[in-house]
Amino acid sequence: MKQSATFIPTLRETPADAEVRSHQLLLRAGFIRQNTSGIYSFLPLGKRVLDKVETIIREEMEAANSVEVFLPAMQQAELWQETGRWYSYGDELMRLKDRNGREFALGATHEEVITDLLRDEVKSYKKLPLNLFQIQSKFRDEKRPRFGLLRGREFLMKDAYSFHATTESLDETYNVMMQAYTNIFSRLGLDFRMVIADSGAIGGKDNHEFMVLSEIGEDTIAYSDSSSYAANIEMAQVNIEYELPTETPEEIEKVATPDQKTIAQVAEFFRTGTENCIKTLVFKADDEFVIVLSRGDHDINDVKVKHATDAKVVEMATPEEVKQLIGCEIGSIGPVALPDGIRVIADNAVKTIANGIAGANEEGQHFKNVTPGQDFDVEKYADLRFIKEGDPSPDGQGTIKFAEGIEVGHIFKLGTRYSEDMKATILNDQGRAVPYIMGCYGIGVSRVVAAVAEQFNDENGFTWPPVAAPYDIHVVPVNVKDDVQRETAEEIYKLLKSNRYQVLIDDRNERAGVKFTDADLIGLPVRLTVGKKAAEGILEVKIRSTGETFEWKQEELLDQLQDFFQKRS
Ligand code: ATP
Ligand code: MG
């Protein structure tokens, strides 16, 4: 492609509102433009990277026996009402009405649509398993769209759905998808981990996320320093046999603690460690208030509270609700002498406390010598806290460390969550109507583009790996007014194209400095500079990712390039 004929609006300055490297460079190098918050256009270079990522995804999905379809983005509300998600999905679902007032959603995900499609067509177990995928725009009215393509409101997703007559069949496909995802992210050269995850609004049981390790990731991964264990911190179990205290409980005593609000302040006031304080939180689990206790040095994980209470939705009670329920501010609440009838659950580690500190449910007052079992009752002990760095790995091997990750893929075993609600059944081998067993598998295609961009860059611009680069080679004639340079460059351009390389030629009448700056910014793997030495048949070569430079004779060009690209594919 001739640079004069395409559209690559590079910028000299870093756009002020772009916080992360990938977003800054995708804008500066002219790959994307923002239309409005969370909504982007792909320009020619961005589109080419997207196409390359899509090609890899398609190849691996097809190799795994998943077949491509294309489902509508406009989805009638009735389908979402059947599963109840019309009501539970909340403000993230983009809703609209047609001219007759009929309600629709713009697809945030496609479980309903695909289940509806199949329930009328696939009625015998003999037609299963079936695995269908699509690559399509998704719409989610995210609260905080940010980091460019990483969290958009309109974004591209590859979503696949599998249908089964037995759980064994689902397990098999799930494992095949796990491998396909591993292949996809490996081929893209991404530094990623597969982690155990929570299923969020989609529902279902087993599920794993694929996380690209990156400082800017919004998720925290807890991994073992000596095994393959890795989990989203939301899900990482704490698997510790705590030793029970041997201290004899002493008489509980109320102490005035004016202005001591945080756990750290209270611990210091009593000259003790935070592990000896009881942290008391009030949650609303569906419609019921629940008191949740942890040690002061631990943090309560609301996903675990949700599982422990079997609630659909849990959230922290507001300060007003706490005041109304218990009669004091959040900083003074505790498990002793609570109003009757409130459930109390506690993290397992609370059992280690004897003669501890807790709020007295009175403004500015705390109790000392508080011992669980002695001074208050707990309905249930469970694993309710976030794992911490330094905790033992739940698989018994090694110690937990943290890393940040960008979620690029997510696979779920849905089971019958959707097929039951939507009465999507097949006749099994005994002639009985049973709901489909389903799996679903997502990749954020546009987010992957950003994740690759985030991983492959340096201070001058992108350093695309060949598999994702918009073109393979950048041919740069230094001075297009020089006939030898211009003609040599064109000759090379044609030669490379006829050898199936994807080539961009900078045929613009610009200063050399401008051309080199743009070339570094765009970051194609190989730059061939056609300058003064062109007359002697010599080309200057720069390998973008390493910064290495060489001089190649024109006649050895094809051999050298073949060697380079073979090593890196
Ligand atoms: P997140 O936790 O990041 O909000 P999610 O769990 O809601 O993601 P899924 O429903 O699992 O996402 O969607 C499948 C994939 O789509 C994700 O793994 C992610 O790569 C991508 N994705 C989700 N939301 C966005 C978004 N707002 N912008 C870009 N990609 C997204
Ligand atoms: Mg997810």
Image (cartoon, rainbow, N blue to C red):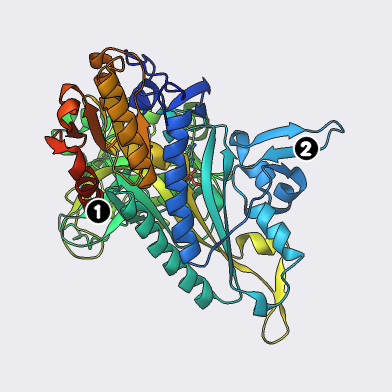
The mark lying in front, picked from 1 and 2, is 1
Please tell me which of labels 1 and 2 falls first in the chain: 2
Q: Which residue is mark 2?
A: 103
In the image, residue 398 above or below residue 470:
below
Q: Quadrant of the N terminus?
A: top left
Q: Position of residue 381 (x, y in %)?
A: 36, 57
In the image, residue 302 above or below residue 462:
below
**Label 2 CB less than 8 angstroms from ligand 1:** no
Residue 233 shows in this picture: no
Q: Are circles 1 and 2 on residues that touch, CB within 8 Å?
A: no
- Give the residue displayed 24% in from the left and 32% down from the top: 528
Q: CA distance from mark 1 to mark 2?
A: 53 Å
Nearest to the observer: residue 378 or residue 289: 289
Give the amino acid type for the residue marked by disc 2 in the picture: Glu
Q: Which residue is mark 1?
A: 566
Nearest to the observer: residue 32 or residue 355: 32
Which image quarter: residue 269?
top left
Which image quarter: residue 128?
bottom right
Label 1, residues with CA under 10 Å away: few <14, some 14-19, many ≥20: few
The disc label shown at residue 144, or none: none
Give the amino acid type for the residue marked by disc 1 in the picture: Gln
Label 2, residues with CA under 10 Å away: few <14, some 14-19, many ≥20: some
507 horizontally vs 544: left or right? right
Which image quarter: residue 415?
bottom right
- Give the residue displayed 42% in from the left and 68% down from the top: 175
